[in-house]
Amino acid sequence: MKGMKCCRDARSGKTHRGGYVWPGARALIVALAASMVLIASDAYSQMRAESASVPAGGAPLLDAKLFVEDLLVSKGHKRTHIRSLMLDPRLTIDNEFIIKNLFHSAPRPSAKQPEYMEVDPKLIKRGPQFVQEHTSAFALAEQRFGVSPEIITAILIIETKLGHYPMKYDVFRAYASLCTALDAEYLDSVLKSHQDGSSSIPAPDEEVYEKARKKGAWAVNELSCLIELAAQVGIDPMTIRGSFAGALGPAQFIPSSFIKYGVDGNGDGRRNPFDMDDAIASIGNYLKLSGWKEDAPLEKKRQAVWAYNHYTIYVNTVMMVYDRLKGLKDREPLPEAAQR
């Protein structure tokens, strides 16, 4: 800048553009630099101590947070940013997320009619009122995507009870924990630690290990997308709550899916997976791109819903609720699976 005086280089004593450096500046700069290195080193050491996961009866096999950090950096994130997230005291690695995602992710069937999930009939009765409360978003979904309010409402009933199901899990923690399944030795220790005679999970075989590796790779991508999505929405990624599988908001999109299919449903100029109107419009977009048409054959509709969730029991239940909301079955009694 014109008129600015430059000081001497603290290392060489040379002047870049003239000016004066006061005595002791060089020593001060060196001291400050040393202090910063020590602070960074202490933080790094603290993270190593906190993240070294110790399976039951064994020595630390993996610096879990550092392992996750390297995975995210390989996805293109700046290490300084990821390091700050890994050092956040709110982040812990929990092996239970590996177990839950490997063995407990399927929808729970009704005891009486296992082809259906349980649904509270009150939620179906509330469906028309819910549509009225979000008229603009449903109109957008129907006009732009050709998807009816009834199928979107059916999905929202099953996913989160129209947005009222409590989100119990820290999503960042869920994905970070699942990433550690990519370390073969660590994964082996986690699975074996659950074979103590009291666990209900089956003995791991090659199929389980392969599923775990795929889940780990999937989690790395989703965690990367979660960081990106949080930045887009303008929220702290550590505050995001969802399912143990990492699904977000009323529609239970995973981060990568919302980034790809998310739609602004309320006209505020941004896409937010936690906003109900955005969730409604985004489901409409997803179903359209998955082949949904209101006049399509039943099997074509089922395929579109299956794209949303790859379980036949889920498709059965959504289509049952959809039919009830559309009145296509002459208001016959709900299957026993839908009664509580």
Image (spheres, grey):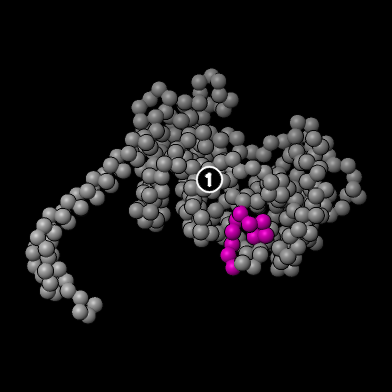
Left or right side of 10 for 200? right
Q: Position of residue 109 (x, y in %)?
A: 72, 36
Placement of the C terminus among the 4 image quadrants? top right
Q: Residue at x 40, y 22 (%)?
A: 57
Does the magenta run of residues contain 24? no
Measured along the vertical axis of the image, is residue 241 above or below residue 60?
below
Task: Name the residue furthest bottom.
Answer: 2
Q: Residue at x 64, y 68 (%)?
A: 267
Instruction: Mark 1: give few (<14), some (14-19) or many (20+) Cα within 10 Å.
Output: many
Residue 296 found in image quarter: bottom right
Residue in front for this viewpoint, 34 or 258 = 34
Measured along the vertical axis of the image, is residue 182 above or below residue 328?
above
Task: Name the residue furthest top.
Answer: 197
Q: Is any part of residue 173 visible from this angle?
A: yes
Secondary structure at badge 1 equals: helix
Q: Main secondary structure of the magenta part?
A: loop
Q: Residue at x 38, y 44 (%)?
A: 87
Q: Position of residue 299 (x, y in %)?
A: 76, 53
Q: Residue at x 48, y 58 (%)?
A: 231
Left or right side of 261 for 10? left
Q: Position of residue 169 (x, y in %)?
A: 56, 41
Left or right side of 49 for 327? right
Q: Position of residue 263 (x, y in %)?
A: 62, 63
Task: Name the residue furthest front.
Answer: 22
Say what amino acid the circle numbered 1 marks.
Val
Placement of the N terminus among the 4 image quadrants? bottom left
Q: Is any part of residue 71 visible from this angle?
A: no
Q: How many marks?
A: 1
Measured along the vertical axis of the image, is residue 155 above or below residue 186?
below
User: Which residue is identified by label 1?
Assistant: 171
Does the magenta run of residues contain 275? yes
Q: What range is drawn magenta here?
A: 269-279
